[in-house]
Image (tube, helix red, strand yellow):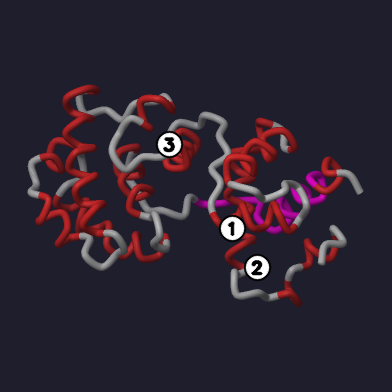
Amino acid sequence: MTKKQRAKIVMTELEKLYPEVPIPLDHHDPFTLLVAVALSAQTTDKKVNQISPKLFEVAGNPFTMKDLEVEEIKFLIKEIGLANTKAKNLKRMAELLVERHDGIVPQTFEELENLPGVGHKTASVVMSQAFGVPAFPVDTHIHRLMTQWKLTSGKNVVETENDAKKLFPRETWNKLHLQIIFYGREYSPARGNKEREFLQKMLFVD
């Protein structure tokens, strides 16, 4: 079976499982999505959704966020991992959004990735989910499953992203990356749940 054939099976089966895919992180606009994605690094989306309402109530835009002290932000996000670093990044991110972009979240990968705490994955999520620009953010679920499905060698997330973009039609990227994430969470947790990994069986993957 070729990679293209495997990719087609993946798209077909995931569309059956998840015809509709909500955005996992709660947000109100591009800024709150950007903040939520930045907070989600090494933390579950569920945890971010638990703490973000209080943060957004106090600082739901760059203008109010930049005026908070780092310690105030840290207190509001203290329950998630890397709170100290994330608090510093959020304050500086807000400052730069106001200084460089009049408080508006930019709509280019380059400008987003120049913000503190915003890497390529975070920028890709914002571009795809906030602005509808085709992107394929690769998280741990996608990286692991793409490797198990033999759609990539799995050397690193950059290679996995490039392989995904070659195998899947551009118009499917924004929805498909979410479908893979939902599948990874439901059927294929990292601890292993082989009896439920029916896609692996369909693809004849050990």
Q: Earlier in the sequence, mark 3 or mark 1?
A: 3
Q: Nearer the viewer, residue 58 or 42?
A: 42
* Residue 74 in the figure: left or right of residue 201: left
Q: Residues within 10 Å of mark 2 (few under 14, many from 20)?
A: many
Tag of residue 141: 1
Counting residues from the start of the chain, the first of labels 2 and 3 encountered is: 3
Q: Which residue matches tag 3?
A: 123
In terms of sequence position, does the residue under pointer 1 or pointer 2 come before the other? 1
**What amino acid is found at the position of numbered circle 3 in the picture?**
Ala
Residues at discs 1 and 2 in contact (Cβ within 8 Å): yes
Magenta segment includes 12: yes
Amino acid type at circle 2 is Ser
Q: Position of residue 72 (x, y in %)?
A: 10, 55
In the rendered structure, which segment of residues is drawn in magenta?
Answer: 7-22
The residue beneath circle 2 is: 188
Residue at 88% in and 44% down: 2
